[in-house]
Amino acid sequence: MEDVEGSYILISILLLSILPITLSFKPKLSFLASAISGLTIIVLSILSFNKEIILNIPSSIDYLTFSFRLDNLSAFFVSVVSLISFATSIYSINYVEEFKNKSLLAFLYNFFISSIVFVILSSNAFSFLIFWEIMSVISYFLVIFNYKDEENKNAGIYYIFMTHFGTGFIILAFIFMFLSTNSLDFTVWAKSNLDENTKILVFILSLIGFGTKAGIFPLHIWLPKAHPVAPSNVSAIMSGVMIKIAVYMLVRFYFEFLKDYSFYLGIIVLAIGALSAIYGIMYAYINNDIKRMLAYSSMENIGIIFIGMGLSIMFLSQGNFLLAGISFIAFLYHTLNHAVFKSLLFMSAGTILFNTHKKNIEELGGLVKFMPKTAVITLIGILGIIALPPFNGFVSEWLIYQSLLFSNNIDNDVIQIFTPIFASLLALTGAFALGTFSKMFGLTFLGKPRTEYHAKESKIFMLTGMFLLSILVVILGIFPMIPIYIIDDIFKNFTQIPIFNIISYKYGFIIVPVDYEFGRLSPMGLFLAGVVAFIIVYLSIRLVSNAKTRYYETWACGLTEDNLTNKAQYSATGFSAALRRIFSFVYGYKEELKQSSGKLKYFYPEKRYILQIYDVIEKIYNQILNVFINIFLKVRYYFQAGIIHVYIAYIVITLIGLLIFVLWF
């Protein structure tokens, strides 16, 4: 509804997102303004809940108007963006101190966040594409911010190419929607009834277009290149927020515009999600660069989100609104959870890089002695990402498991055959996630330093930004019913069927997705049980045992601390070696063992082990690209003949073709 109060709220959100950009000449002040703006936008979004606020900015040119809309779905995603930007902006106050051009980084950072907010609030195709392109270009400049580094420039090329590859498919999807509705307005699209062929075509085009931005398999090749090289506060925004814009638009398309709850299209989304999850975490497991590991982990979590989305579409096609609602709540709740713990972990990686100037796990170790607060905060983020109760990742993944397991009650052979397979893949993904982050934390913070560095505890604003998100990891795990209630309202907007009262027992302290006897969960009960168990064990040890606590050096096969070198520790490469060889058919890597020349009578010759990891999908793309490049090089010699008459003929032929197109259509 277009009311004055609602318009003020929407205009305020738009202006607040722009405000920090104007203060970029004073970086610290702009980051503080960004944090305050983020907090204010969250409050305004909450005030707008259960309202539909539309703001149109008219134009003298048909179709080229700016339109913005704030409803439950956009308010939820704007709140997620603002929540993460609030924490990362506080973090950035100290983080940018080592950068030379702080003002430029502050300008691009704030512009990036503002463009994301404008993308979410856009309510027609013209507005959306304008701000989508701004978001893409600004994020490209952030990826190549350290442009003198060859790795950054290479990552920037991959990123901008894949971004515009996806944008091309998005434009095609928009064109088909326009041809079917004669409108660019999203509210008109929501009321349209498309024919089946158009629905399928738009479904596929939007999946490819937005899937590229999300980093799904096999369109993910930009993600592990761009996220590691961008400044860490930007990596937190890109992984925690930007890739979720694709999820936001797919929800718009599949649940609002198309309303096509096709069983087999749901299976496609589900299968892509499962492949993305297992592929992403398997590559995260073998990578030793912390930020690249986290980037592949983002691919895994996007896969989990797509699993929930695919399940919801599939269940709606079968008329099972309860399981559809649970799946819908699960994947949007996981969208929020992933934004929180992944942004936290990227900030943690940035803190490690800030203090040690290293991000290769093989060069780290023993950081808990130098950075104990950072270590504890990072551990909380890891407990969230591996879905250990009572932390936030557990509830959303548990709901997805419930959806998969109880789908066996649906009388459909395809569902009964394939959902156990997808459940098994999700379980395997969880096992790899446990291994990945055990490796990350254990080899980074524990043991002895593997190289020489002078690390110290993080600065106050960096710690504060991370601490705020670590608190949320715990709160969202113990009190999930608040976000579940909000997401249920979004589901109700699309289906007119709420399920919160069905799955909520005892004032929300118990979640019962389907069956009270076999599937209930009390997050608060789990937390309290854990606290009580810890107290009992602690008191038992302290009261029952009379032995004094004694401290000894760890047994190291007879070696003492004086002659025990850091090379005697488990290496990151050694940690993942067994599974790397077992799953060698999935991984792309090259091993090389170099031995020093010359004969030594009494000493063992020096050997050097080199491991190169590459993404097999990227290798396939490069091979295909090389084929096209060779073809174009050969064709070029025929078209670029160097004769002016030939070039004039090209112009004439092009003009004739355009005239025919205009007259025909």
Image (tube, grey):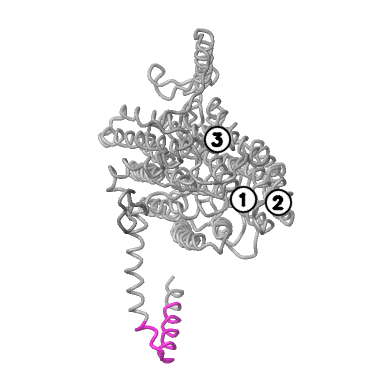
Q: Verify whether residue 18 appears in magenta.
A: no
SS for callout 3? helix
Quadrant in the picture for residue 472: top right
For image coordinates 52% across by 33% down, the residue present is: 379
- Three-letter amino acid code at the position of disc 2: Pro
Dominant secondary structure of the residues highlighted in magenta in the image: helix
Which tag, 3 or 1, sits closer to the chain's start? 1
SS for callout 2? helix
Labelled pair 1, 2 in contact (Cβ < 8 Å) = yes
Residue underneath mark 1? 113
- Three-letter amino acid code at the position of disc 1: Ile
Q: What stretch is highlighted in magenta?
A: 637-658
Count of labels in the image: 3
Residue underneath mark 2? 20
Q: Which mark is residue 368?
A: 3
Q: Nearer the viewer, residue 252 or 375?
A: 375
